[in-house]
Image (spheres, rainbow, N blue to C red):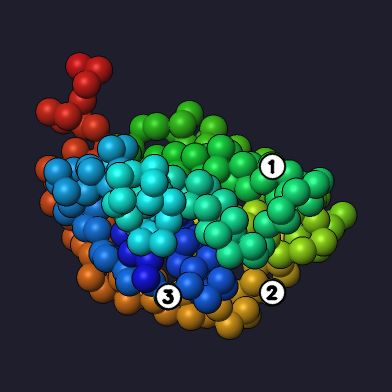
C-alpha cells in the first residue's frame, strides 16, 4: 500500500489522479502546509525540500535504501515512477515516451511555476505589484495558448494517448475560469474540451472526491495564521534577503 503525503493543491491532485487511474491502493496522509507541517523533522526526512506531494512505496527498490520503503518526491518524478511501476500512461520507449515526457516537463517548468507566481501575486502579495501580476498573467495566457495549439494537432498532450502529461496538466488547466475569469475559458475551446473529457473519467471523479476529503483535514489558506504564511512565503523574519 502506497502512502501519499497530501494536501488539496494541483501538484498533489496529479498524484491522486495517477493512483486512481492506475488502480494502486493508497493511504493519504494530510500534510498541513498552511500550518507549517512541511517543516517538521519527520516530514523533512521524506522531502528535504519541504513540499508535498511525496509517496512512500513499500514495494519500491528497497536495495537503494537499506531495506527501507522507497520514498519519491517531486510530482513529475512521482508520475514517471508510478507509470514505470505499472506500465501505464507512459510508453516504455520510443518517440511516444519522450513526447509525453517533454509535454509533462512543460507543465513542471512553466505551467506550474507561472500559475503559482500568478496566484501568489493575485492572492497573497501586498498591493502595488502590478508589474509582477501582469508578467505572470501574461505568461499563464501564453503557455495556455501553446497547449491550445498543441491540442489542435493531437487529442492528448503527449500525442494519441492519454498519458502522465495530461495527468500533470489537468489540475492546473481546470482552474482557467476561477483564475483568469469565466470569459477566458472561451479563448481556449480545445483546452476546455480536453479538460471536460478528463474530468469525466471515473478515476478522475474518484480522485477529486478524495481531494475534497483531504481539504477538510488541512488548514485552508484563508484560515492560516500570519506567522505560518510568512514562513511559507519567506517574508517578515523569514526574509533571507533582508
Ligand atoms: N515542483 C514541486 C512543487 C511542489 C509544491 O510546490 N508543493 C507545495 C504545495 S502545491 C508545497 O508543499 N509547499 C510548501 C512550501 O513551499 O513550504 C512538485 O511538483 O512536486
Give the secondary structure at mark 3: loop
Q: Nearer the viewer, residue 185 or 27?
A: 27
Marks 1/2 in contact by CB < 8 Å: the verdict is no
Q: Is residue 94 left or right of residue 68?
A: right
Sequence-wise first label, 2 or 3: 3
Q: Is mark 2 within 8 Å of ligand 1?
A: no
Q: Which numbered disc flags the more N-terminal residue, 1 or 3? A: 3
The residue wearing badge 1 is 102
Q: What residue is at 21 percent from the left and 25 percent from the top?
A: 239
Q: Which residue is mark 2?
A: 197
Q: Label for residue 45?
A: none
Q: Position of residue 63 (x, y in %)?
A: 39, 46
Q: Does residue 218 lie above or below 77 as drawn?
A: below
Which mark is in front, 1 or 3? Answer: 3
Q: Which residue is mark 3?
A: 25
The N terminus: image quadrant: bottom left
Report if the CB atoms under discs 2 and 3 are less than 8 Å apart.
no
Residue at point 24% right, 32% down?
A: 234
Q: Is residue 188 visible?
A: no
Measured from the top left, where is residue 154 in percent x and y? 84, 58
Instruction: First in sequence, mark 1 or 2: give its number.
Output: 1
Amino acid at each position: 500500500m502506497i502512502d501519499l503525503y497530501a494536501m488539496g493543491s494541483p501538484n498533489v491532485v496529479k498524484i491522486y489522479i495517477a493512483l486512481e487511474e492506475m488502480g494502486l491502493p493508497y493511504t493519504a496522509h494530510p500534510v498541513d502546509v498552511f500550518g507549517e507541517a512541511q517543516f517538521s523533522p519527520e516530514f523533512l526526512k521524506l522531502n528535504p525540500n519541504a513540499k508535498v506531494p511525496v509517496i512512500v512505496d513499500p514495494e519500491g527498490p528497497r536495495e537503494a535504501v537499506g531495506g527501507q520503503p522507497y520514498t519519491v518526491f517531486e510530482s513529475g518524478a512521482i508520475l514517471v515512477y508510478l507509470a514505470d511501476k505499472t506500465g501505464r500512461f507512459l510508453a516504455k520507449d520510443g518517440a511516444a515516451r519522450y513526447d509525453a515526457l517533454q509535454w509533462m516537463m512543460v507543465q513542471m517548468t512553466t505551467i506550474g511555476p507561472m500559475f503559482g507566481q500568478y496566484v501568489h501575486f493575485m492572492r497573497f502579495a501586498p498591493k502595488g505589484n502590478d508589474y509582477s501580476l501582469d508578467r505572470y498573467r501574461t505568461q499563464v495566457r501564453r503557455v495556455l495558448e501553446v497547449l491550445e495549439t498543441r491540442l489542435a494537432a493531437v487529442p492528448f498532450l503527449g500525442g494519441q494517448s492519454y498519458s502522465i502529461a495530461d495527468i500533470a496538466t489537468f489540475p492546473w488547466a481546470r482552474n482557467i475560469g476561477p483564475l483568469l475569469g469565466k470569459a477566458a475559458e472561451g479563448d481556449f475551446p480545445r483546452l476546455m474540451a480536453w479538460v471536460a473529457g478528463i474530468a469525466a473519467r471515473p478515476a478522475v471523479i474518484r480522485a477529486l472526491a478524495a481531494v475534497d476529503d483531504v481539504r477538510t483535514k488541512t488548514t485552508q489558506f484563508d484560515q492560516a495564521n500570519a506567522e505560518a504564511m510568512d514562513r511559507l512565503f519567506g517574508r517578515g523574519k523569514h526574509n533571507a534577503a533582508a
